[in-house]
């Protein structure tokens, strides 16, 4: 079996917005074919077929798994949601909820009870230091409008 035939039917994710092809960040697709002579990869993205030149392959990546952040706005039949303390800074109720609600039929939560408890109890009500008030006050003093 050749390397190109092993890549067929693999799931990919679009990493950037490409307005020429009308494909956008986070869109998932499946590799349909690879033409080594023309140096093109054909991907099925939903109902559309999109052709990528080898030079444009940096716009896509294999999507064996995707992060909760990348999955926002998408749904999947089954979601496996690993929750561990190694990344405790990212554990929040909002992120946990988003991960849970990506599944249409089944969510499997894998991880430590302590991490799950921390995520459920942690809210994103942290104060942000954007200096927005300062910027608005100073914008009013100048001719620049934000």
Image (spheres, rainbow, N blue to C red):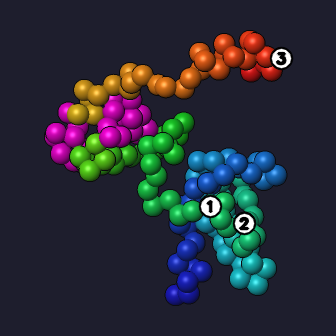
Which is nearer the eye, 97 or 145? 145
Q: Secondary structure at mark 2?
A: helix
Which residue lies under the disc numbered 2? 56
Is the Cβ of the residue at disc 3 closer than 8 Å to that at disc 2? no
Q: Secondary structure at mark 3?
A: loop
In screen coordinates, is 111 left or right of 133? left
Residue 112 lies in quadrant:
top left
Expressed as whole percent of the image width and height from the top left, the position of residue 144 reads 80, 20
| Residue 83 seen in render | no
* Residue 93 highlighted magenta (yes or no): yes
Mark 3 vs mark 2: give the one in front: 3
Residue at (38, 21) in percent of width and height: 125
Magenta part of the chain: 89-117
Lower position in the chain sequence, tag 1 or tag 3: 1
Residue 137 lies in quadrant:
top right
Expressed as whole percent of the image width and height from the top left, the position of residue 77 reads 43, 44
Which is nearer the eye, 83 or 127? 127
Expressed as whole percent of the image width and height from the top left, the position of residue 86 reads 26, 50
Which residue lies under the disc numbered 1? 60
* Residue 20 highlighted magenta (yes or no): no
Which residue lies under the disc numbered 3? 143
Lower position in the chain sequence, tag 3 or tag 2: 2
């Amino acid at each position: 079996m050749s390397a190109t035939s092993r890549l067929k039917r693999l799931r990919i994710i679009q990493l950037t917005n490409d307005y020429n092809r009308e494909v956008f960040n986070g869109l998932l697709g499946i590799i349909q074919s690879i033409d080594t002579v023309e140096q093109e990869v054909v991907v099925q993205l939903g109902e559309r077929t999109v052709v990528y030149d080898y030079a444009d392959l940096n716009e896509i990546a294999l999507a064996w798994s995707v992060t909760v952040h990348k999955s926002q706005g998408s749904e999947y039949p089954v979601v496996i949601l690993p929750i561990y303390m190694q990344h405790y800074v990212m554990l929040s109720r909002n992120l946990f909820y988003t991960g849970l609600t990506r599944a249409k039929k089944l969510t499997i939560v894998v991880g430590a009870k302590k991490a799950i408890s921390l995520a459920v109890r942690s809210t994103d009500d942290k104060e942000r230091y954007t200096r927005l008030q300062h910027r608005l006050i100073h914008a009013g003093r100048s001719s620049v409008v934000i």
